[in-house]
Amino acid sequence: MACEDSKKEKFATRIINQRFNKKDVHGAISMPVYRSAAFEFADADSIAAAFQYKEEIASHTYTRITNPSVENLERKIKAASSAENVQMVASGMAAISNTFLAIAYAGANIVTSPHLFGNTFSFFKFTLAAFGVEVRFVNTDNIEEVASAIDDNTCAFFCELITNPHLEIADLPEISKLLKSRGVPMIVDTTIVPWCGFDAREAGVDLEVVSTTKYVSGGATSIGGAILDYGTFDWKNNKRLNDVAKTDSMSQFTFKLKREIARNLGAAIDPEVAYLQSLGMESLQVRFERMSESAYKLAQFLERQEQVVKVGYTKLSSSPYKAVSDKLFTGNPGAMLTFSLKDKAACYSFMNQLQIIRRATNLFDNKTLIIHPESTIYGTFSKEMKQVMGIEDNLLRLSVGLEDIEDLQNDIKQALYSLK
Ligand SMILES: *Cc1c(COP(=O)(O)O)cnc(C)c1O
């Protein structure tokens, strides 16, 4: 599934060739950072028109609502995907919370996998629960289980494109058929594989949430999030959105999100960050392809090491998700892999021995990062919760960066050797 086919220019060209909404007075070739809280108008009529969205080309009034540098990043992401609308926010978690605060209501439920990013799990299970929203955990490999969890108050099916650190992939095109027949939107967190490697629209995704902190930021420069609306879902059955106006340019969801939720929650992305992430978008494809190629090679390399018990990467023949991975992704399935050692002590000792690979949380930095998820990301969860979430204590997660593959292999080799 390539997102190349439907549009005239290829992926990187579409992003780099994206022009500003209005011409810069100095002809700046990169969109400058508009570090201004507010924007001035020539007269009372024009400021009134701007607030009532009556201008031909919308201008900006206040940076919590919109900002030229942020808009420029939204246009680049729109060019990269085939989304009808893109809303930038301050983080990946803001993308998830803004999305669900726009569509959920007391009495509604969300059908999802328990294998979620830690804060997403906590947001569903604790934060939203306090407002009367129920989360229903299902095994997304079992379509009957998904089907039987859905009822009239299911406001969404949600999952992550490849779960972390379990590396499971839901068969989105299959689930999409079920959701379409039941009138339920499919919302997917696609942080793990960006638009050049995965076509969300073709897979049946209605709304996409992304932590742009990861690939998009261009090397872990900043925190950000994006909400993409493909305009594919009819919101009239959603009890929260059925009386929201539908416009020619926006779905009810985007209208609610842009005009109410995003500005009320106020998690606006900073213009400086939007500038950095716009640069990140321009080099996204080359970085993604290089990192993913190294990840695949490292996964194969790790499989050959005797101290390694198990390797997780969905392109490996040993992965139960290989077929669906090959179906959904254009090239390699991203730069994250996992591997298991004998026990937790071996994981710690291996990590402490590394010279090039850094011990840090985060994904898709230019630098290769390693973490022991059980003691860190999931460290504050109870034993029972870890069991529900399937977090094992002999597992390491590696996010492969842009270093030379030989140096990475040598670093891993010497650290494994020290375990003997
Ligand atoms: C990092 C991450 C998030 C959260 O993003 P932030 O930008 O840190 O808020 C959500 N989902 C996935 C899959 C992530 O990797």
Image (spheres, grey):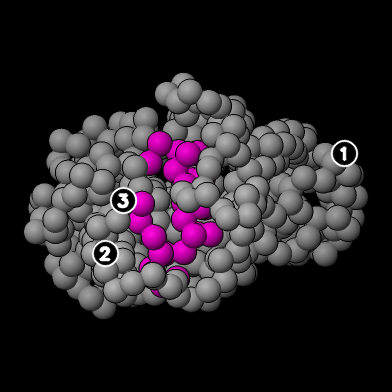
Q: Mark 3 packing: few (<14 Cα in 10 Å), some, or many (20+)? A: few
For badge 2, the amino acid type reads Ala
- Which sits earlier in the primary sequence, circle 2 or circle 1? 2
For badge 1, the amino acid type reads Glu
For badge 3, the amino acid type reads Glu
Q: Farthest front residue?
A: 43
Of the pair 170 and 308, the residue shown nearer to us: 170
- The image quadrant of residue 419 is bottom right
Q: Is residue 1 visible?
A: no
Of the pair 230 and 288, the residue shown nearer to us: 230
At 46% from the left and 64% from the top, the residue drawn is 67
Magenta residue check for 59: yes
Distance between the alpha carbons at the discs numbered 2 and 1:
59 Å
The answer to whether 381 is drawn above or below residue 285 in the figure is below
Distance between the alpha carbons at the discs numbered 3 and 1:
55 Å
SS state under label 3: loop
Q: Which residue corresponds to mark 3? A: 56
**x%, y% of residue 176?**
28, 36
Q: Mark 2 packing: few (<14 Cα in 10 Å), some, or many (20+)? A: some
